[in-house]
Every structure is written in C-alpha cells, then in structure tokens.
Amino acid sequence: MGVVITGMGIIGPGFTSIESYTNILKTGTSVLKREKMKNKFIHTGRVQSEEMNLTFEKGNRYPKSAKMLLHASEMAVQMARVTPRDYKTAVIIGSSGGVISEVANHTSEMETGKRLGPYAIGNMNANTLSSSINAQYHLNGMSFTLANSCTSGMDALHLAKILIRSKEVDLCIVGGVDATVNDLVLQSFLPLRVLQTGETLSGPFSGGEGFAMSEGAGVLIVEDEKSALNRGADILGVVKATSITQDARSPFLSDSLGGAMLKAADECIGTSMPSYINSQALGIEENDAIEAMVYERKFTGSSIPITSIKGMVGHAMGASGTFQIIASLISLKEQFIPPTIHSNPTKYKNLPIIREKMDAPVESVFITTHGYGGNNGCAWIS
C-alpha cells in the first residue's frame, strides 16, 4: 500500500477555491498585476485580506501566512471528509519567508515609536504557521515548520511520505505558504535582477525576463492508502515518489549545470515516463536552462509535454511547489494539461512546451522545483 492524497485546499491572488484555481488553469488567465516600486514597474500577485475565510475564533490575530493556511486547510479537511484528531496526524508546513512580513511590519512600527502588542512575538515566530493548524484541529502530535526556500512545500510532502511509510503517522496535513509580497522582500530581490520589470508580462521559458512574485497557501491531506480506503475516502492522487537534493555550492547560488537537479529527477522517476512535466520554470535564464537540460537529458528523444503555471499565478515562493502539486491533481481529475502563458516562442524551440490548454489523457505528472541556495525537489504523482 502507498501514500495518497485525499484532500486539497488553496488560496492565492484572485482565487480562493479549487474551482476558481481550476478555471484559471483551464483558461490560461493571469492573476498578476503591474505596480510601481522605486521608479520601476514590477508584476506581483497579492492576496487581499477580504479573500480569506476564517472560521477559527482567534484567527484574526494571526499573521497573514497563518490566515491563508487556515483558509486552505479547512477546504482540504472538508474535501477529505476526515477528522484529523481521530488519527495519528502530523502537521508539516513549508515556507520560504515564514513570517518575514510580520517582522518587517513590527520593525516599522518600532521605528515610528509604536508600542508592540502581546501577540507580536508569537506572530514573528515561524512555528506559528504549523501551531495554528494544530490549534485549529486540536492536534498534539508531530508538528514541523520547514524553511527550505522555494522547495519548502515540496519538501513538506517528502517528509509526509517518509512519516507515513515508516508508520510513524497515519495522516499528514501538508502545507506550503508564503506572504512575501512586501517592500522588504521585493526591494531585496531587485539588485539580483530576477524580478520582471518590463512593461508587459513575460513568463516561463522567456529567456531571462524574470519572475513575478506572488503569495498564497496550498494544503494537502496526505494519508496511508490502506487507512484512506478503510474509511471510504476518495483518492485524488497517489504519491508514487518524491526526492530532494542540494547543490552544496553556496547559500547565494545554485549549480548552473543542474547536476543535483538531474540527480533528484533520476531518483524520483527513474526510467518511467509521465504524461507531462509540471516545471518550475520561472523565466529566470539559469532556472529555465536547468529545466531544459533536465528534460533533454532525462527524457532524451521523447515528446513528453512540458508546462509551467508560473505565467498564470506567479511564483509563490514556498507555496509554489504545493501550487504545482494541486495543479497536477486537478489535471489528473479533469484530464487536461495547463498552458504555459507569456513564454517566448523563439526560446527553447526544441522543448515540447504546451502554450495552449491541451485536453489529453493524464495518468501521471512529474513535478520539479528549485530553491534559492541550491535546494531541488521532485514529485511523481498519479
């Protein structure tokens, strides 16, 4: 018996449910907006406070990241039709920025002489992300907050698979979240010249135009297959394999040759062929080139379709891998491949990039993610 996914929930810029996210993927709609920062125009995807639905009594005191997690987790739990406290349950949340927005906000308040309230220290503690889920569902088992850069959501699924297969737990609430669309983070990225600053949107496989930073949360209910079948759960997907590697080069650099990324792909999918590849591909020259190299080396001579959702929903940092996983689960259910929008058709001509929605049989999806500082993560979902 394996590891399966029985529930999913999501919130992001302009979408607050699986249904609205599905519509974006099917229509190839971009939710990104253009805004001005330091005499430059950038493209971002922000989640508005009124879009978050909170059922938890004290949830309004939580940081934005935790609020988005609660929104998505309630959706996932309801879809799975499960009461988490009835099982051996672990909470695993991945986030690149954690609660960095809260740190930035409270620092600004101090600089203006404002007195900080009693919830400030808790809201600046990254553990709040996982502990908010524990409080919501009255869980007192294993609890983790992972800060593994942009692979954090994918890494959370990897840890869930390990814990379930080792019989440590029966069920995991797995989340990826980030609320990094703020002045501190955006201005810190500007010197790296990786943000989109052009007048018009560009996207994945665009030849180095950069990425649009977005935010949001995705949550999965991941279970032992036997336990899920015993309670009559609907299985959305099977986690056939996951893998993670590290470039081990620098906290500030990735390996431009992509050797560790290729190793992660080999460990994850072996010689199997997925129905399509859901690629991280951001629009950063190095990142796109690594994705292209992995495809060409790993799937030599094949015509497996490759797509990236980043042109539609932006790059939600630690939540991005979870967004990709959820998009893949939707593909498995609805039998289509989402389009890669805003790509440059003159670049990567040798890749079978899907630029318009494709209705096609989807039996499995191979997902790739990268993180600042050299993290790599892959998943194979069927």
Image (tube, helix red, strand yellow):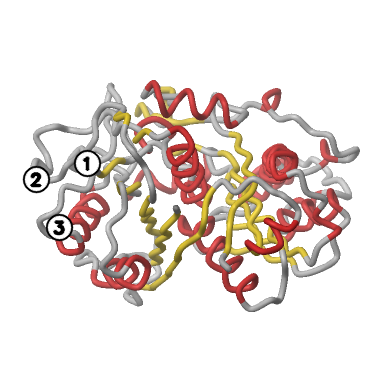
Residue pointed to by mark 3: 296
Number of labelled discs? 3
How far separated are the C-alphas under marks 3 and 2? 9 Å
Q: Which mark is residue 350?
A: 2
Residue pointed to by mark 1: 205
Sequence-wise, the earlier of marks 3 and 2 is 3
Q: Is residue 319 left or right of residue 313?
A: right
Q: Is residue 108 visible?
A: no
User: Considering only vertical position in the picture, is 40 above or below 326?
Assistant: above
x and y percentages locating residue 309 in the rendered image: 37, 37
Within 10 angstroms of label 3, few (less than 14), some, or many (20 or more) residues? Answer: some
x and y percentages locating residue 130 in the rendered image: 73, 57
How far separated are the C-alphas under marks 1 and 2? 12 Å
x and y percentages locating residue 207 in the rendered image: 17, 41
Residue contact at pointers 3 and 2, CB within 8 angstroms: yes
Sequence-wise, the earlier of marks 1 and 2 is 1
